[in-house]
Amino acid sequence: QVQLVESGGGLVQAGGSLRLSCAASGHTFSSYAMGWFRQAPGKEREFVAAISRSGDNTYYADSVKGRFTISRENAKNTVYLQMNSLKPEDTAVYYCAATVSYSGLGSQYQYNYWGQGTQVTVSS
């Protein structure tokens, strides 16, 4: 079992940056691939980024490619999402998630554990 707690959300102006963190409990963090998803009001949850167990492979939604960077520190049981050049359309609740799957990391249905979410609001 993995428990996930996100932090780092907040209010930022367009063009600004935020770094989200997701702290995981347990000693098997490196056994999970990790992902970030987001959900805006009235919209379905969507994939943002994912990272493999070792951190060697990363994946991004087209909408954030070149602006967001996912990374992890297995020694600290933490995954990060660095968000630069933020846009108003990035406003959403951001969730981190853990999966034992080795494929389909862009699908929320592959993930076994979820955090409670952190709000990111980008003003224009």
Image (tube, rainbow, N blue to C red):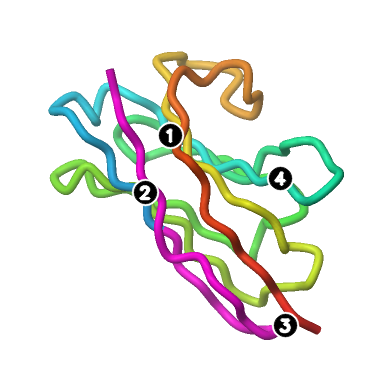
Separation (CA) of disc 1 from disc 2: 10 Å
The disc, 4 or 3, on the residue closer to the chain's N-terminal end is 3
Badge 3: residue crowd in 10 Å (few <14, some 14–19, many ≥20): some
* Residue appearing at x 63%, y 52% in the figure: 93
Q: Residue at x 40, y 58 (%)?
A: 7
Estimate the spatial distance between the alpha carbons at disc 1 and disc 3, rounded to whole Å: 27 Å
Does the residue at mark 4 contact the one at mark 3 (Cβ under 8 Å)?
A: no
As displayed, is residue 39 above or below residue 2? below
What residue would you read off at disc 4? 39
Q: Which residue is mark 2?
A: 22
Per the image, label 3 sits on a secondary structure element best described as loop
Query: Circle 4 — which element?
Result: strand
Looking at marks 1 and 3 on the same chain, the residue that comes earlier in the sequence is marked by 3
Task: Tell which tag, 1 or 2, sits nearer the viewer.
Answer: 2
Disc 4 marks which amino acid? Answer: Gln
Mark 2 surroundings: few (<14), some (14-19) or many (≥20) residues within 10 A: many
SS assignment at label 1: strand
Give the labeled residue for mark 1: 34
Towards the viewer: 67 or 109: 109
Q: Are marks 1 and 2 in contact (CB under 8 Å)?
A: yes
Give whichever of discs 4 and 1 has the lower sequence position: 1
Note whether 11 is above or below 5 in the view shown.
below
Amino acid residing under circle 2: Cys
What's the magenta region? 1-20
Q: Residue 50: where, in percent of width, then height?
A: 52, 38
